[in-house]
Amino acid sequence: MGSFSIWHWAIIAVVALLLFGGRGKLSGIMGDAAKGIKAFKEGLKDEDAPKKDESAKTVTDKDGN
């Protein structure tokens, strides 16, 4: 029950490579999550933009232009 053997370190290395490697599932999941957050933020910006444009249009319409 002392130190880890070479097999313990090999298993830890394989798990770390699978999780944090370029083709690992965790990195793919995190990339998908980042894309989802980015799309969500863009969606919020798109909802705010028409409201501002509509208010600007109504102001110019009231002036008679």
Image (tube, grey):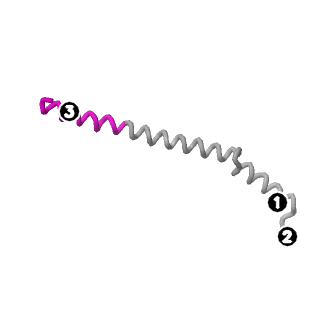
Q: Which residues are magenta?
A: 47-65
Measuring 60% from the left and 46% from the top, which residue is drawn there? 30
Query: What residue is shown with label 2?
Result: 2
* Amino acid identity at mark 1: Trp
Quarter that holds the C terminus: top left
- The tag earlier along the polypeptide, 2 or 3, is 2
Instruction: Provide the secondary structure element on which disc 3 rests.
Output: helix
Is residue 54 positioned above or below 6 on the image?
above
Q: Which residue position is annotated with label 3?
A: 58
Q: Name the residue at 26% across, 33% down.
A: 54
- First reached walking from the N terminus: tag 1 or tag 2: 2
Q: Is residue 53 magenta?
A: yes
- Element at label 2: loop
Q: Which mark is in front, 1 or 2?
A: 1
Lateral position of residue 36 relative to residue 52, left or right:
right
Judged by its main secondary structure, the magenta piece is helix
User: Which residue lies at the image location 17% right of the left edge and 30% below the top edge?
Assistant: 61
Task: Decide: is 4 above or below 39.
Answer: below
Q: x, y percentage for residue 23? A: 71, 44
